[in-house]
Amino acid sequence: MDERVKTATLSIISNSSLIIMKLIVGIFTGSVSILSEAIHSTMDLAASIISFFSVKISSKPADKEHPYGHGKFEDVSGVLESILIFTASIFIIIEASKRLISGKEINSSTLGFLIMFLSATINFLVSKRLYKVAEKNDSMALRADALHLRTDVYSSAGVGLGLFLIWVTNLHFLDPLIAIFIALFILKEAVNLLKSAFDPLVDVKLSDSEISIITNTISKYSPGCGFHKLRTRKSGNERYVDLHLVFPGNMHMKKAHDICDNIESEMGNSLKNTEVMIHLEPCNNDCRNCGLLNKSKCKNR
């Protein structure tokens, strides 16, 4: 089984267990912050299921219908997961506001904060594993799932701390206030996730740091006539680079081909999962096609 699929399965199992635990304790104590955490974990479970299927599909090789592979399924899952986070956050804010107005007290804060700190510990360990596999495989779906769980770590710890303060101070209005604070925190994370997942779907270019690696590699092996029409994009964990590389008109085809191979090889070593497409162009005598480099450096002048 693919490592990404195994890790996504682990997330599903942990989230299912935490939902049951939080619901039981939330109903018993009457704590809206614990119930909001149960809702949060339910959204995490839905996200984990989406992540599971997206990494399973994205791991399939390219085929006739998807010649560029299935990587964008991971980006789509990231968008769906961010929408789930938005939905959960709005629901938590509404329920917490109702509780704040009604002034209803919770039954047992002691059991509540113990369960919340246990939940935070479990989610921290699982999210750490998810982040590790996501970075190793450059997986947007697992990165989104890890983000869900990491926000759950902070929110569970926050709820636990709030319940502890309620136990010490007997100020029960802290419970819905903490739930609202958690929801606002989750909304902020959802915005960041949505941008990260949506950019590849509209073929936003690679990051400036990645572009710098690409241009430095091209310049290192360039025959001196420059390059132009550099385009980059990302699909899942796959990077795509295409450009026009200008060669002296009298250069032997074999030498030009070897230069292209060197560029492609070094880019692949510097940036994981990178596919490079290079279009060769001959340099005119007046160097009109010399691209980005100084025309005085053109070897065909």
Image (cartoon, helix red, strand yellow):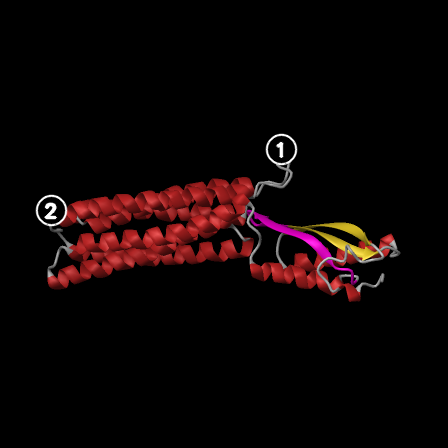
**The C terminus - image quarter:** bottom right
Q: Amino acid at mark 1?
A: Glu
Residue at screen point 33% across, 59% down = 121
Q: Is residue 211 left or right of residue 121?
A: right
Mark 1 nearby-residue class (10 Å; few <14, some 14–19, many ≥20): few
Question: Which quadrant would residue 248 be assigned to in this image?
Answer: bottom right
Q: x, y percentage for residue 37? A: 27, 49
Instruction: Please name the residue shown 50% across and 49% down the image.
Output: 140
Residue segment shown in magenta: 224-240
Outermost top residue: 65
Mark number, residue 102: 2
Identify the residue at image location x=56%, y=50%.
237
Q: What is the CA distance from the residue labelled 2 to the residue labelled 1?
A: 56 Å
Which residue type does callout 2 highlight? Ser
User: In the shown orientation, is residue 70 left or right of residue 13?
Assistant: right
Provide residue 90's location: percent of width, then percent of height: 28, 45
Residue with the mark numbered 1: 65
Q: Is 200 displayed left or right of 168 in the figure?
A: right
- Disc 1 on helix, strand or loop? loop
